[in-house]
Image (cartoon, rainbow, N blue to C red):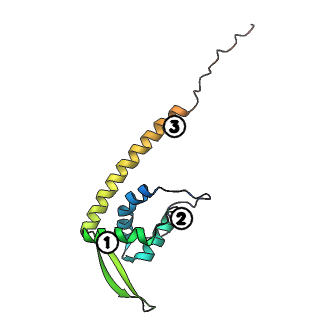
């Protein structure tokens, strides 16, 4: 599976609210781990890459999510020694985590569809009326 950014880079930074980042953290972490086992720094980098820099997670935000997902049985962890000799904690998604990811995907798709519908209706109301607002002047007048 390709690990290229999914979002186009933005010239102006888009501030994503902390509430939205928190709400999206579970499906994002589970989806990243569904790609393959990973460790904290690599997950942070993957989020940054996927969002083209729009989402900058910190250790203080990620590790509580990982610990909660592990407590719930959605992920498992193990310690491994990196080539540098440093120990890293790797995480992998469990079967239960994949089931949860599927449920998260369904919920986010429902939210996305609802917002798109609302925004399309709002955009349609804001479009100018193509009919002229002034009656045409009759010829020969």
x then y, percent, for residue 128: 58, 30
- In which quarter of the view is residue 39 placed? bottom left
Identify which residue, 35 or 112, lies in the foreground. Answer: 112
Element type at marker 2? loop
How many other residues sit within 10 Å of disc 2, few (<14), some (14-19) or many (≥20)? some
Element type at marker 1? helix
The residue that disc 2 covers is 53
The residue that disc 1 covers is 67
In primary-sequence order, the first of circles 3 and 2 is 2
How many other residues sit within 10 Å of disc 1, few (<14), some (14-19) or many (≥20)? some
In primary-sequence order, the first of circles 1 and 3 is 1
Give the Cα distance between marks 1 and 2: 24 Å
Q: Residue at x 34, y 57 (%)?
A: 105
How many other residues sit within 10 Å of disc 3, few (<14), some (14-19) or many (≥20)? few
- In which quarter of the view is residue 34 placed? bottom left
The residue that disc 3 covers is 123
Q: Which quadrant does the C terminus fall into?
A: top right
């Amino acid at each position: 599976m390709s690990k290229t950014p999914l979002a186009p880079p933005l010239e102006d930074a888009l501030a994503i609210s902390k509430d939205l980042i928190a709400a999206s953290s579970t499906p994002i972490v589970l989806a990243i781990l569904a790609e393959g086992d990973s460790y904290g720094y690599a997950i942070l980098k993957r989020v940054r890459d996927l969002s083209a820099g729009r989402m900058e997670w910190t250790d203080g935000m990620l590790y509580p999510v990982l610990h909660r997902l592990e407590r719930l049985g959605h992920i498992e962890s193990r310690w491994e020694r990196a080539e540098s000799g440093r120990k890293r904690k790797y995480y992998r998604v469990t079967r239960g985590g994949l089931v949860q990811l599927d449920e998260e995907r369904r919920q986010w798709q429902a939210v996305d569809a609802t917002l798109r519908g609302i925004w399309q209706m709002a955009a349609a109301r804001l479009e100018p009326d193509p009919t002229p607002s002034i009656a045409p002047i009759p010829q020969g007048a």
